[in-house]
């Protein structure tokens, strides 16, 4: 059971790192960004390049891969997302989904479609409650919690954070204070994209790297955003770990239903708290 | 004299899906005056404000500020030039404290005091912002509520805070969109008194639905009806206009 819990927390940690950018983009720009999944996949592939082609160790490779994705994310923001402000929700879905499809095909073209397995970068287990766990997974959980703490401080203590909080509440009112709110939303978009890339980097050694890995997590991340409330930091945090646990526990008793259960939870949440967009 | 026109529109039109919310409006605002815009609900007053302040671009026509075309300048850029507004539904930030609301409004002013580059709120606060914001809060009578969560303010206090935010932006033109909407009678008197006190510092445009409230406040009145300007002039003159009487009271 404890193994299942740790597994659930690991998935929760990854889900949080992945979903928070999606949630903030949805909450601030009112854009459902399917290209987020591409950023995640690209992060994983850049990790492979950094590890195998550049021959870096895991930590520098992870850093290089995460940072290398940022210009791509900035390009997506500048040329796609920014043109979608104020357009209808479905426009953004179609446009960003197109980016995702094109990107995935590019990845297939460059790297091929064969899954690339990676080994556990730490390869050590630690004993906890008399059971041993891969240290790597525990570190992912710790990292997710510290990222949440960092984001919380960012929104609580910094001026840029306050501008974003105010913009989530009323974008036009922020503009009327003479603040170019879109610029700050773009910063948030980049931070969220960086985290998505980091999520891809961190999850790559646990599963395997393949062009469709983004599709798999994308819908689960949407479930997290919807259950947690779009734009809500704490909501996304709690929803990530709750749904991570749902996947882990369902998976333990009935493997094939693990992901379906996530959508069942989402459906229940939507019945009691309809989406307000 | 053309040099004293501070804000002007030429043939400004805004269509939403074919419906013309504002239609071919030519409007001139003289520097230092207090002007009112009245009209029934749905006459296009707020849409006209949104065009003046750059919340969205017009479908046709131009907006000029001190003779320069600002039609394509976005809202935040116009605030930098001194065109400041408030909203019909009070727009302050409930999730922030009163003081944090002011910090946001002072980011622009803060640039001159070299504080906006500071990343941390506490640092920004230790600069010149306390003096600036205390001044604005004092003017609207909210000084002792600076540390309150904005969501705990009454609607009237929120309106005063919104006006304080606008004052922090040092407007040369201040546009107030139905500042009395939703206020109690006591609060209306307070906000009216506040506007009277500060209005000499800038050019004022005020949208109001009830004519009686602003007749004493403004020297010129414009009437909008179905997206068009149908009358303009001194308040008494405009109110005597048969067309205006027809629109407002259904009889000449």
Image (tube, coloured by chain):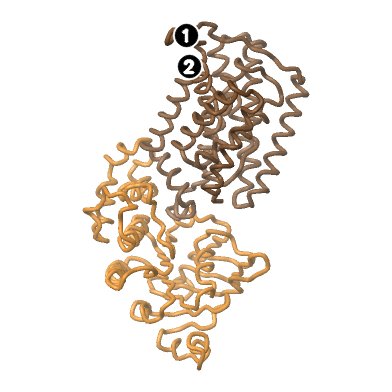
Chain colours: A brown, B orange
Left or right of residue B186, residue B231 in this image: right
Label whose residue precedes the other's in the sequence (1 or 2): 2
Numbered circle sitting on residue A109: none
User: Label 1, on which residue?
Assistant: A131
- Would you call the spot at circle 2 few (<14 residues within 10 Å), some (14-19), or many (20 or more)? few
Q: Are marks 1 and 2 in contact (CB under 8 Å)?
A: yes
* Residue visible at 63% across and 71% down in the picture: B20
Which residue does the image show at 51% across and 66% down from the upper left? B67
| Relative to B181, A68 lies left or right | right
Q: Chain of mark 1?
A: A
Q: Residues within 10 Å of mark 1 (few under 14, many from 20)?
A: few
Compared to B171, does A82 lie above or below? above
* Subunit ID for the residue under disc 2: A
Residue A149 location (% of width, % of height): 40, 29
A142 with respect to B112 (left or right): right
Q: Residue A64, image x and y in percent?
A: 57, 19
**Is residue A254 visible to us here?**
yes
Q: Residue at position x 63%, y 65% from top?
A: B16
**Nearer to us in this view, B179 or B116:** B179
- Give the secondary structure at mark 2: helix
Give the residue number, with chain letter if any, for mark 2: A2
Residue reaching furthest to the left = B144
Q: Nearer the viewer, residue B17 or B22?
A: B17
Residue B87 locus on image (x, y percent): 43, 62
Distance Cα–Cα, label 1 vs label 2: 8 Å
Same chain letter for marks 1 and 2: yes
């Amino acid at each position: 059971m404890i193994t299942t819990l740790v597994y659930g927390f690991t998935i929760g940690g990854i889900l949080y790192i992945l979903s928070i950018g999606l949630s903030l983009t949805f909450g601030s720009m009112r854009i459902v960004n399917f290209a987020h999944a591409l950023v995640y996949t690209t992060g994983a592939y850049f990790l492979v390049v950094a590890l195998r082609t550049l021959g870096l160790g895991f930590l520098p490779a992870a850093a290089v891969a995460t940072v290398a994705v940022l210009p791509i994310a900035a390009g997506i923001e500048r040329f796609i997302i920014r043109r979608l402000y104020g357009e209808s929700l479905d426009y953004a879905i179609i446009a960003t989904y197109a980016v995702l499809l094109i990107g995935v095909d590019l990845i297939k073209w460059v790297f091929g479609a064969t899954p690339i397995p990676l080994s556990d970068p730490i390869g050590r287990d630690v004993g906890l409650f008399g059971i041993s766990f891969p240290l790597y997974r525990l570190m992912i959980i710790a990292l997710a919690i510290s990222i949440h703490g960092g984001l919380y401080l960012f929104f609580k203590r910094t001026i840029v954070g306050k501008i974003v909080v105010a913009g989530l509440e009323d974008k036009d009112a922020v503009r009327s204070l003479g603040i170019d709110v879109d610029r700050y939303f773009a910063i948030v978009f980049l931070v969220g994209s960086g985290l998505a890339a980091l999520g891809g980097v961190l999850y790559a050694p646990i599963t395997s790297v393949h062009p469709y890995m983004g599709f798999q997590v994308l819908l689960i991340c949407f479930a997290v955003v919807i259950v947690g409330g779009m734009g809500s930091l704490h909501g996304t945090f709690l929803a990530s770990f709750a749904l991570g646990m749902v996947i882990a526990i369902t998976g333990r008793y009935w493997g094939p239903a693990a992901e379906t259960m996530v959508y069942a939870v989402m459906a229940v949440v939507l019945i009691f708290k309809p989406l307000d967009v | 004299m053309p040099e004293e026109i501070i804000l002007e529109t030429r043939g400004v039109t805004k269509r939403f899906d074919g419906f013309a919310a504002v239609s071919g409006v030519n409007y001139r605002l003289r520097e230092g005056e207090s002007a009112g815009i009245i009209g029934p609900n749905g006459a296009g007053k707020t849409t006209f404000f949104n065009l003046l302040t750059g919340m969205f671009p017009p479908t046709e026509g131009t907006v000029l500020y001190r003779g320069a075309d600002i039609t394509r300048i976005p809202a935040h850029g116009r605030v930098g030039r001194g065109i400041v507004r408030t909203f019909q539904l009070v727009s302050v930030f409930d999730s922030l404290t009163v003081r944090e609301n002011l910090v946001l409004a002072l980011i622009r002013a803060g640039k001159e005091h070299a504080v906006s580059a500071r990343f941390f709120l506490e640092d920004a606060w230790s600069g010149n912002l306390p003096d600036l914001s205390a001044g604005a809060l004092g003017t609207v009578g909210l000084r002792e509520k600076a540390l309150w969560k904005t969501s705990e303010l009454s609607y009237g206090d929120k309106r005063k805070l919104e006006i304080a935010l606008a004052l922090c932006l040092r407007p040369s033109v201040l546009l107030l969109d139905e500042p009395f909407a939703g206020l109690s009678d006591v609060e209306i008197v307070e906000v009216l008194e506040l506007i009277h006190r500060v209005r000499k510092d800038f050019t004022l445009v005020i949208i109001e639905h009830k004519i009686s409230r602003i007749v004493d406040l403004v020297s010129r009145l414009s009437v909008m009806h179905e997206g068009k300007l149908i009358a303009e002039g001194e308040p008494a003159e405009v109110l005597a206009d048969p067309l205006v009487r027809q629109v407002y009271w259904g009889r000449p």
